[in-house]
Each structure stands twice: as structure tokens, then as C-alpha cells.
Image (cartoon, rainbow, N blue to C red):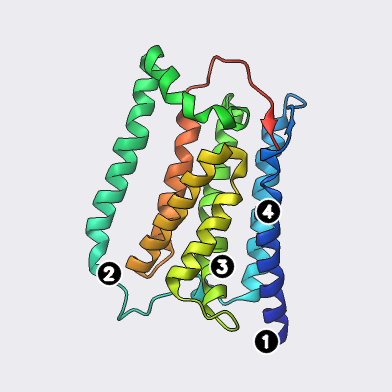
Amino acid sequence: MQLLQTLLQHMLAVYLVAVALRSTAPFRRATPIRGPHWRLSNYWATIKWQWAFVAVLLLAMPLGSILGLAEPETANWRAYPQLVFVVVGNIVGGMYGPIVLAWSHLGFRRRFLAPFAPVQALLPITLTERLMWVGVSLTTGICEELMFRGFALEYLMQQPFSLSFGGSALITSVLFGLGHAYQGRRGVLRTMLFGAALCGLLLLTGSLLFPIVVHTLVNLRIALMPASKRPTPALAR
């Protein structure tokens, strides 16, 4: 059983690297959107493959080692109240607040949506797409944290790599960013920094629960954003 788990861990690690490298293809070519249900199909595909990865992951590693790296006596549990206030406050005020203004002020809406131009083709427009995006947000918030801040960090800190938390966090944050290459170069950099920040939350709290909540809240805001009036461009793939 131990041999099978080790083999699965190596296979999952190789798969994560392959997905990250393959995702850099958007920098080289673009594919136009095809079909009226393209976005829904894309969302559903994301949900399916990420949960499939997690299903295999749960066979490869104990859930406890994925959800929390720190021992109870070393985790800074007292930081939770301050973290909740600062992080959730910044998310609500800094990310959700401007969405309200974007719905009511056309000029601000254009400026607000401009940074999302590289991924405009992926953003939900109809009510059905927005509801499906909620499922995507929950999936990516849970599954990507289990993949990167849970499995990948723990994998690199074990034999034969035995990296420090900082070294593991750097590598996993780079892979996390490359896996979002469809967002463009700036999006990759922002995602890398976001991944590093989530690693910091994990280190500070000793639990993956908080990064999961933050990641989910960040993604959920997309479902509430107004749609752009500009023609939908081809999405880099």
C-alpha cells in the first residue's frame, strides 16, 4: 500500500508540472470560442478534472497531512481573529466594493473591467453561467488549495527533495502561476504572488482551511461582475 501511495504521489507531481507547462501555450497561439455553450462546457471540464485529481490525491496521501502542515503546538492559532478581520475585510472592501460601483457607474465599469480583458472570453455572462461559476469557484478554491498548498508543498518537503517550506512555497507558487497562463503574463505574475500569499497564510495558521476560504472568495467575485459591452475576443489557449 505504501508503495502504491508513493507511486501515485510521483504521478500526481509529474501531472501538475505537465499541466503548468502545457498552460503556457496561450502565450503562443489563440483559439476562437466555438458554440453558444462554450463557457459552460469549459466550466464543467474544470470542475471534473480538478475533483478527479483530488480523488486520486486522497488515495495517495492521508487527508490530515494535506489539510495541515503545522503541529497544533506550533500553529499560531491566536492569529486567527486578526487574520479574519484583515483578510476578509480587504476582500470585501477591496474586491467586492468596486463591483457595486461598476454596476452603477459606466465609466468606472470600463476601467474596472479593463484588467480582465485577457480572460474576458471566460467570464460568465448569463445567469446560468454565473451559477455555474459559483461551482467553479468552490471547486478551484478547494481543489487547487489541496493540489498546491496541500499536496505539492508536502511532497517537496518530503524525501527525496526535503526542501524547506520557503523553497517549496516558491516552486509551488511558480507552478500555480504558470497554470493560470491563460490570464496573460501579468496574470501569471499576480497569480504567483497570490499563491505565495496563500502559502504565508498556511504557514501562519497551520491549516489549509483559511487559504481555501480566501481563494474561494476571490474567485466568487467574478460571478457578480457586470458583463463587458465589448465584443468577446478569441481566448488564448
Q: Position of residue 201 (x, y in %)?
A: 36, 61
Cα separation, mark 2 vs mark 4, equals: 36 Å
SS of the residue at dot 2? helix
**Disc 1 residue crowd, few under 14, some 14–19, many 20+, Cα 10 Å:** few
Tell me the residue at 27%/62% (across/down).
80
> Foreground residue, 164 or 7?
164
**Disc 3 residue crowd, few under 14, some 14–19, many 20+, Cα 10 Å:** many
Q: Nearer the viewer, mark 1 or mark 4?
A: 4
First in sequence: mark 1 or mark 4? Answer: 1
First in sequence: mark 2 or mark 4? Answer: 4
In which quadrant will I find the N terminus? bottom right
Q: What residue sits right under mark 2 in the picture?
A: 77
SS of the residue at dot 1? helix
Tell me the residue at 58%/30% (across/down).
118
First in sequence: mark 2 or mark 3? Answer: 2
> Which dot marks residue 21?
4
Tell me the residue at 38%/59% (across/down).
210
> Vertical placement of 161 versus 83: above or below?
below
Q: Position of residue 235 (x, y in %)?
A: 67, 30
> Which dot marks residue 152?
3
